[in-house]
Amino acid sequence: MTLLLKFDRHYAGYCYHHHSSIIRRIGKINYDSRRNVTLGILRETYNKWERRAPLSPHHVREILHEHNKHTISKVIVQPSTTRIFSDTEYLKAGAILQEDLSEADVILGVKKTNISEQAMRNKNLLLFAHVIKGTNLSFLSDILQNNIRFIDYECITHTTTNSPPKRLVAFGEFAGMAGMIDILQGLGQQLLLSGNETYSTPFLSCPLSYMHPNLVNAFASVARIGRDIQRGELPHNLPPLVFAFTGKGNVIRGATQVFEKLPVQWLSNKDELKQVVLSKCDKLGHRCVYGYMVKPEDIYVLKKEKHKRISSVFNKSHYRSNPHEYTSVFGRDIAPFINVLVNGAYWDERYPRILTKEDIRMLYEQGNTSLIAIADISCDINGSIEFLDKTTSIDHPFFHYNPLNGMISDHFETSGRFHKNNDKTISVMGVDILPAELARESSEHFGNALLPLLTKITIGSSPDNNIALTLPPELELACIAEGGQLKPRYGYLATFLMRTATTAEEPPFTRRDHPPTDSANGLLKYSSLISLEGHLFDSGLINRALDIIESYNGCSYEIRECLVGQKENKKSSVLIRLNSNERELLTTIIPNKIEALAQLIVCSQASVKAYFYDKGELQLQNGATVRSECTQTDQNVLILGAGRVSASVAEYMGRTPGRNVIVAGELEHDVSAIARLAKRGKGVVLDVTTNKTGLSSLVKNADIVVSLLPASMHPIILEECLKANKNMVTASYASYCNDSNFQNKCKQAGIIVLNEMGLDPGIDHMSAMKVIESMRDRGGKIKSFVSVCGGLPSSASSGAEDHSLNPLRYKFSWSPLGVIKACGNPATYRQDKRTVFISGSDLLNAAFPVKIWPDLSYGLECIPNRDSLHYGDLYGISKDSDTIFRGTLRYRGFSEIMQSLKQSGLFDDLKPESHKWGEQLERMVSRNGCSSLSDYLALSTTDSEKVTQVANFLNWLGLVSSEEPLARPESILLSFCQVLEKRLYYGSGEHDMVLMHHDIWGAFEDGSIEIVHSNLKLIGDDNMSAMCKTVGYTAAIGADLILNRKITQKGVITPFDFSALQRNEILGLLQEEGIKFEETLLLKSASTFPLPNLV
């Protein structure tokens, strides 16, 4: 009988037609007059290790025992000699054991089966087939040809929450458990067999997961190893063993359940991690192992900040929306300090790899071979762990990777091409069916999730008076095909089926590795990704988007990820990979058409992102190219960066008539907002690290470049300025171009590269040098130099005017943990020719009150700021100065409260005794034999006023008698930091304040003493912060003076290279912007000259 193929995607009409009849009906499936449902359970044949079952004998017993509560009255089970549950167990549960499942209405399996070998026509079939990505298409064709209503477990998701789609039936937790157990055995083998130093450890006695009869037995095996470790059976010359975990969710939850059967000391941050390893000894006597839960902020940084020592604060929301802008520093910051990595992180091609081949090669070349075992439970081939080149099997779970030569072996080798000089290797586990190792428990777990859905199946009547099954919403929405047709939301799969029908092949490029680039070998030259998120299926957007792609014969495609939302308020997401020999097709034509389509189909509420592989790097295409080059008029100013201080630069430079201001940055919203501040401003979306052509074009057409980007990116900008002979200004330290080669090139090119034009460095240097030079010019010698600076909340924003609003009188503009740790840094300064060193533990006690700004409603205090002595050389005053001091300003009382909080135990990184703050404080009080919080606080001070202040602060934070839970149950310190971050932040209408003060004493030959007090106080407003004004206006003035030929020194320069006249002119221009120093001069005779007294 001939088989004709007809397709109309927009009516989901992928139908098989016989010449004698046409299957027209899409709705209910006809049955005979029976009024009950029969379930069938398939025998698994997909893999020899697949021993799981969709329902256990326990579930069968429950179904049949309560058959009066639902429609299922019979269960038929195909016999199996490999299933984890015996045939006898099913018989005892009441099931019928037989090969023939033709009587079953609903047939359940775990993995796909051979449809032709089963009597499945017109049946309901549930199993994992993973067809929504356009794979396993021959199986899907059989489904359609046999008129099967097919539900893929992968598509059954929760329907009750507003969160992204989440699978309802899954095995992730058991994958984590099995992977953790297996890697313990892998670690034991590595320690014994790999490298020059070998160790016999208890891990060797840990059987692989599948060798245990059940999970209880597996847990007992791991616990036994833990007891051996506690008894000291790890070799004493073995360094501390550290396990790191990446990812979150069910996989990592399962892995840590196993891990914590060992004696574990969890590390809370990267500093602790490094400290344990660098100590090179186990302080706990080799009686434990260490664990570290890697956080996204630990390893992901913006690409442009990879080489900065301190990166900007990690923004999780920005990372999730723009993963292509980030790179991983795992190889630099984590891998050198761990021995085992357990990876459960989600990954697709938009995201940075956690660990690349190059990362691990560089580590091993440097002699750091600590990382020796990896359990890649996520199992993405060439994915987040790039050197996972293949999957492994349950019976051979490890392969061994040599980072130095990139070779892999399935066996340990101690010689030959793979393993020269007894090099260490990494044992890598990539089993893709890990839950099958714990077949009994994972089957029970899976059945627990599936059973409630099966019992919701009801029986109704069809139009022809036959009965039909009605599925619950969760199953109905996961239905891929019915009545010989694809369901409307999965109509896009017809394209893949048509391609298979004409080529007899599955879609190409199924590996998640680098994009194909060799057109000579039949591979397409260019690759790109298109990410769609919205109501893609019910609106028909996905179908029409694939129509667009399919219309270009020179383009192949593949669906890499597909998450289907189950309700109207839940969006779906699809990731499509395209391949073509035509670059423009992937970078412009197709993305633009799909974007236009998404805008046209308003009900889709869809967002479209297009990415293109350029030289191995994934780049966002939407609006990422330079829109147009600026045309030459009077002057063109290029501002690179659209961050917090760019507004003042654009506004200042844009005041001059006939001057074009071009603001270039990565985010269109930011560059547009900044550019609007200039009279003739223009925004350009540009990533300087990836679009060198665009950067070169902009620099070429500029008269001056102001780079407000991170200092690590300045060399890139400077190279372009050298090529085009353009001047450049930054607010950064000049250390990025200290290389004499750079300096010579700049002088030879005749360009000006002006650095350190900001607040600190910048204004601090120029204002201090003004006073110092004035004294020197008159024969004076600097006897004392004191400089203090602080970025604080303004009085109104801090609550300083009303103590009850904010007793600490501080707002956290950066990490509270960082502020707390800074309160423990040591400090060094010179006072009265005496070098003073303050330990970190005494730093807060060293704070002293200062009375500099009498107009402030509350006083200030000063905390010594690290090492002040190198500033003596910077200003040329070390030889004559008796006092050199730099400090940090805070509102008065800050240090006392912080010290008391520290002594009270709230800064202790210890596990809390209670999960509620009120109870935790009560435990701390009672543990020290006190009857009240005040009595407890009085243990650390006899100052009753101080006790009251701290008690008031804890009350103000809402912790006393509070039911509020500790946010970080592993640490009092981290939980307290979260409270501070929640309560002490800059709100709407609150403004910052910059304070700077110089106290400079000069001695003259006539015996007189001059004391100059130079003060700056600037409060931000609704338009600009004080920090934006002080940094941005300074850089803008420098650029303006260069354009007006008032700064002409060539080469790499800083304010120290200016003449006094130039420095004073800049300070005068800053004064016009409201950045004004107030100076006070005091004259004293030598006979009345007191020693400078900081306290």
Image (cartoon, rainbow, N blue to C red):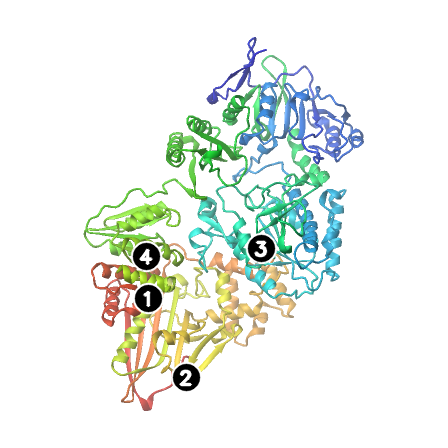
At a point 48% along the width and 59% down the height, the residue shown is 815
**In the displayed structure, does residue 305 sit left or right of residue 1069?**
right
**Residue 832 image label:** 2
Local packing at callout 2 (Cα closer than 10 Å; few below 14, some 14-19, many 20+) is some
How far apart, in angstroms, are the residues tagged by discs 2 and 3? 51 Å
* Residues at circles 3 and 1 in contact by the CB criterion of under 8 Å: no
Label 1: state its secondary structure: loop
**Residue 1024 image label:** 4
**Of the residues shown, which amino acid type is indicated by label 1?**
Gly
Q: Position of residue 1035 (x, y in %)?
A: 30, 60
Q: Which of disc 3 and disc 2 is earlier in sequence?
A: 2
| Numbered disc in front, either 3 or 1 | 1
Tell me if residue 1095 can be seen.
no
How far apart, in angstroms, are the residues tagged by discs 1 and 2? 28 Å
Mark count: 4
Q: Which of disc 4 and disc 1 is earlier in sequence?
A: 1
Q: Which of disc 1 and disc 3 is earlier in sequence?
A: 1
Q: Which of disc 4 and disc 3 is earlier in sequence?
A: 3
Return the residue found at the far front. 416
Label 3: state its secondary structure: loop
Q: Which residue is mark 1?
A: 762
How far apart, in angstroms, are the residues tagged by discs 1 and 4? 19 Å
At a point 29% along the width and 83% down the height, the residue shown is 780
**Of the residues shown, which amino acid type is indicated by label 4?**
Met
**Residue 792 image label:** none
Q: Position of residue 720 (x, y in %)?
A: 32, 53
Q: Is residue 1068 above or below residue 5?
A: below
Q: 799 or 326, which is in the foreground? A: 326
| Numbered disc in front, either 2 or 4 | 2
Q: Which residue is mark 3?
A: 965
